[in-house]
Amino acid sequence: MRPHPFKSDAGMRTSPWIIIGATVILLITVLVLAFQNIQRDRRHMNEVLQAKGVALTRAVEAGARSGMMGMRWGGAQLQRLLEETARMPEILYMAVLSEDGIALAHSDARRVGQPLHSDRPSPVLPQGVEENHTVITSADGHRAYEIQRTFRPTSPSWRSRQPSAGAGMWRHGPNSERLEGPAERQEAPRTIVVGMDVAPFEKMIAGYVRNTIVMSAVLLLMGFAGFVSLFWMNSYRAARRSLQDTSAFADQMVTHLPVGLIATGRDGRIAVFNSAAEAITGVQRQAALGRNPDHILPERLCGMQKVLDQGHTIREQEMACVFARDKIVPISLSATRIVNEEGQFVGNVLILRDLGELRRLQAEIRRQEKLAALGGLAAGVAHEIRNPLSSIKGLATYFAGKFSDGSQERKLALVMTQETDRLNRVISELLEFARPTDIKRRPTNINELLRHSMQLIAQDAAAKQITLHQHFQAGLCLARVDPDRLSQCLLNLYLNALQAMETGGSLTVASEAIDDEHLRIQVVDTGSGIAAEDVDRIFDPYFTTKAKGTGLGLAIVHKIIEAHGGHIQVESTPGKGTRFGLTLACQPDTTGDAHDSIQHPGGR
């Protein structure tokens, strides 16, 4: 049997650790993913700020290179450009610094001519570094993403040359020389600084962090709940599977119990009714379930309820009950109350055991013991009587010859002779009954044997206007019997049937296969029948209901059938007839011939 899942110590030790380990792995995974998401968001913020700052610095540089030609740095145009550009959202300040970090132009005009930061040195990039990005915290507590870019501004210069045709322009003066176009002159490097407010981005990042933490917590809780649910589901499935196995085992055990089992619930109605209970009571299971036992069980049986209500247990109490089939059934009853661990009433259990077969075996044993004793006694008595009986018959015959025909004395002598013959016949039957049955088995075609045996009584049946019917099943197996002894048995049954039909009727002899190893012979008459109280006694020696019967014919039939290892069953209804059934064993792997059912009116 599979062990119960909740009683496995190893399973109970390891399952919680599996959940804890899986939860820790899930926690580490969630934290790593959350950290990666936060880092990704920060990198994205830096990339956005960097891209925006670089774009602004390049725009200022481009404006300075293209639109400020001819101006000196620090002019009003550059100052206005920084002020207007600094109006954009998220820009804290913009400035153009000299080589020594002094603001040549600033988005806050008041800061022109001052260092960019009062609390730290002005950002001046080392030689060869054109761009730098950093996050700073100003004196007023603002955090800024600062981008510094170095470039060299150019300013125009004019130079003269000798005039040449079609080029340049002319300066009118005493020397009348032509001026060349503007030429770029490199100035000292400058630094463009853009400070952008990171508070909105940090606020957005903080929101992302909160969302990530919340989602991670939800994911962690869902994962933990999933693991716990999986554990519970596995435990539930194991428990359900174990319960199903236990239920199936209990159902099969209850169903195939050789005794009748009837159980009632708290409401007193039948909850369990197995197949053995069906066979004993004759009540179908579906008709019994859900009903009160008082409605389907005999009153005497249900009278045990008072004993059960008092808390007593009934053990193997024998009684005879009449169930639905109106047939008296001897049973053994055991009953008890069922209570749970809390002492609450759950129901009653009744166990019925059919004692019919036991009683039959007991009666058969008693009968065999009686027959053995009677046989021994009969054999001794028969031998002692037979010798003087022969002398009596001889003397009666002698005296009959001494008297003339028709005389009273001769008639009495003949009566003595006849009675001596009858007594000798009874002794012969008694010796036949007492003698051990010598069976010489051989494979026999039962249909041929039955056909031959019925021919022996055909004339007697015709004389009494009794119709003979034969119904032989084709292809029967060959029986392992003694043909002579079985014919003697059948003739006894036929003669009894003919004697039971004084005013005519029908005698039917049939053969049929029970299974591959057994066959049945049926002898059915429409005679006077046997009283119910006499059915169990007809096989007893010297029991007879006929005026001239010896009471040994059916006893010999029973003895012959038992010697063949067979069984004989009797069903009789007074005034309607009697049915004898003989069950015999087959010869292995043999079959007889095939004959159709035929009917012989009057035995012909």
Image (tube, rainbow, N blue to C red):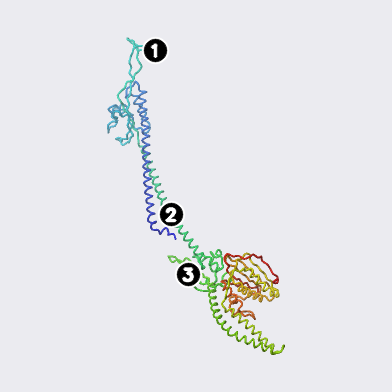
Q: Earlier in the sequence, mark 2 or mark 1?
A: 1
Q: Secondary structure at mark 2?
A: helix
Query: Which of the two marks, 2 or 1, is nearer to us in this view?
Result: 2
Residue 200: give x, y in percent of width and height: 37, 37
Location of residue 153 in the rendering, given as x and y in whole percent from the top left corner: 33, 24
The residue at which mark 1 appears reads as 166
Q: Which residue is mark 3?
A: 336
Q: Secondary structure at mark 1?
A: loop
Query: Where is 102 relative to 576, above or below?
Result: above
Q: Residue 566 location in percent, x, y?
A: 57, 71
Cβ–Cβ under 8 Å for marks 3 and 1: no
Q: CA distance from mark 3 to mark 2?
A: 38 Å
Determine whether, in the image, residue 597 is placed left or right of residue 90.
right
Identified at 37% across, 50% down, the residue is 21
Tell me if 170 is positioned left or right of 299 in this view.
left
Query: Pointer 3 and pointer 2: residues touching (CB < 8 Å)?
Result: no
Structural crowding at the residue carrying mark 1, measured as other residues with C-alpha within 10 Å and reported as few (<14), some (14–19) or many (≥20)? few
Quarter the N terminus occupies: bottom left
| Three-letter code for the amino acid on which mark 1 is drawn | Gly
Q: Secondary structure at mark 3?
A: strand
**Residue found farthest to the top:** 174
Q: Which amino acid is tagged 3? A: Thr
Sequence-wise, which precedes: disc 3 or disc 1? 1
Where in the figure is residue 387, as x and y percent of width and height?
60, 85
Q: What residue is shown with label 2?
A: 234
Query: Which kind of residue does numbered mark 2 sit on?
Result: Asn
Give whichever of discs 3 and 2 has the lower sequence position: 2
Mark 3 Cα within 10 Å, few/some/many (few <14, many 20+)? many
